[in-house]
Amino acid sequence: MIFKRISKLLSSSDRKITDNCCQSSDSITFGLIKTEPIPTNDISGEMAYLSSLHCPCKEPFTFHRLCSFKMNNDKGEVIIDCYELLCRKGTHHYFLYFDMYHPQTSKKVPNNLTFGSPEGRGWNNFLPDFDTIKFDLILSHILKADRYKKDIWLLGDSNKMLAHSNEMLLARDYMDKNDINNAIQHLDMALLIDHKWEQLWIYKKRALIHLGKIDEIRSWCDKAKIVFPNTWKSICKDNDI
């Protein structure tokens, strides 16, 4: 069960991250840019860190892993994880960068953030409907997404790609019928299977434009800039918003 796996991750030794007072970083961009990632010990360190992090209004966050990418630093090639965070009140929104290949998890926090009780809730995978999920409902969304991803991956690579194509075709069919809400549901299913397809991001942006969801469009484009740093302009054009 995914809830047991999440509990195990959050009950690891790194959960004791809040036993000592958090330390403000000397850098105001610590964790906020990819060249200054937060050091953690494995995925469990990321989960423990994020679940204990609180926003400037002392609220915990919901979070999901937006993407991972390779980068070169003084240690050679490393993999950096980018997480998107939204506080419980919906007031504070962040993108934080992590390097999980460290022996210990950092006790330093990004500018204006603090550690508190471990109330945060999230996942180390991508949630395409993250912007619309309320704090109290995110675990049920994670459970549903995890079951779907498991079922798809068990089909094997060829059938996984077939399922991905089918979801895209269904989404386009609903778009043609002007049934935008159903189109978004199938786009989100395709994004759960593989969210690194630019065309899917373009389709979802068009669907959000059709519904007039300006804030969600802007948020979607903010994500696209991180997931597709070299080609995001083909997804989000200024005159689309």
Image: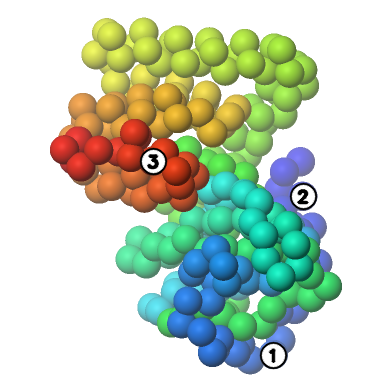
140 above or below 52?
A: above
CA gap, disc 3 to disc 1? 41 Å
Q: Which mark is residue 5?
A: 2
Counting from the top left corner in percent of width and height, residue 60 is at 50, 69
Task: Give the class, few, some or many, for how many residues have Cα within 10 Å of label 3's Cα (few <14, many ≥20).
Answer: some
Q: Amino acid at mark 3?
A: Trp
Q: Amino acid at mark 1?
A: Asn
Asked if residue 138 shows in the view, the reply is yes
User: Earlier along the polypeptide chain: callout 2 or callout 1?
Assistant: 2
Q: State the scheme by which the image is colored.
A: rainbow
136 sits to left or right of 103:
left
Q: Amino acid at mark 2?
A: Arg
Identify the residue at image location x=47%, y=38%. 128
Q: Which mark is residue 41?
A: none
Which quadrant of the figure has residue 207? top left
91 above or below 161?
A: below
Circle 3 residue? 232
CA gap, disc 2 to disc 3? 34 Å
CA gap, disc 2 to disc 1? 26 Å
156 sits to left or right of 126:
right
Counting from the top left corner in percent of width and height, residue 95 is at 47, 61
User: Earlier along the polypeptide chain: callout 3 or callout 1?
Assistant: 1
Task: Give the class, few, some or many, for how many residues have Cα within 10 Å of label 2's Cα (few <14, many ≥20).
Answer: few
Asked if residue 185 shows in the view, the reply is no
Which quadrant of the figure has residue 47? bottom right
User: Earlier along the polypeptide chain: callout 2 or callout 3?
Assistant: 2
Q: Quadrant of the N terminus?
A: top right
16 above or below 2?
A: below
Q: Which mark is residue 20?
A: 1
